Amino acid sequence: MKTNKKKHAYKHIAKLQNVYAITMTCLVLFLGYIIYFVHTYVYTTVIKIQEISFIQPDIQVETINFDLLDEVNTVEQQKGKVEKHAPTHDPFHAVEKEGVL
């Protein structure tokens, strides 16, 4: 009978070893996911920003020529005011003048 007690005397320690192994595995997987996330989103974003700033170091903002803009707007308004004539002859024009319609 004493042999059975000794066999089961350390059973709770074996359970703790399993819990420890599961906890450490989860911790390692979680840290691996964090490293993957940082590399995928943060690190690659920083690299892309550095590439863009290297490719286009002299980004300049173009100024708007407001005089030219006003001139274009006035020409566009004048085009809208010009009366457009039909390129073909209107067959009903003579009938309207006679008062038939």
Image: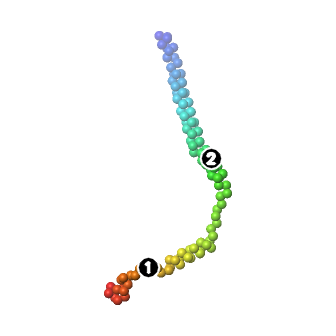
Badge 2 local density, few (<14 within 10 Å), some, or many (20+)?
A: few
The residue closer to the viewer here, 73 or 30, is: 73
Q: Which mark is residue 44?
A: none
Badge 1 local density, few (<14 within 10 Å), some, or many (20+)?
A: few
Q: Spot the residue most to the front.
A: 88
The quarter of the picture where residue 94 lies is bottom left
Q: Which residue is mark 1?
A: 87
* Residue at the image position 52 percent from the left and 22 percent from the top: 14
Amino acid at dot 2? Ile
* Residue at the image position 35 percent from the left and 89 percent from the top: 98
Please say if 47 is above or below 79: above
The secondary structure type at the circle numbered 2 is helix
The residue closer to the viewer here, 14 or 37, is: 37
Amino acid at dot 1? Pro
Q: Quadrant of the C terminus?
A: bottom left
> Residues at badges 1 and 2 in contact (C-beta under 8 Å)?
no
Q: Which residue is mark 2?
A: 47
User: Residue 24 at what x, y percent from top left?
Assistant: 56, 30
The quarter of the picture where residue 61 lies is bottom right
User: Residue 88 at what x, y percent from top left?
Assistant: 41, 79
The secondary structure type at the circle numbered 1 is loop
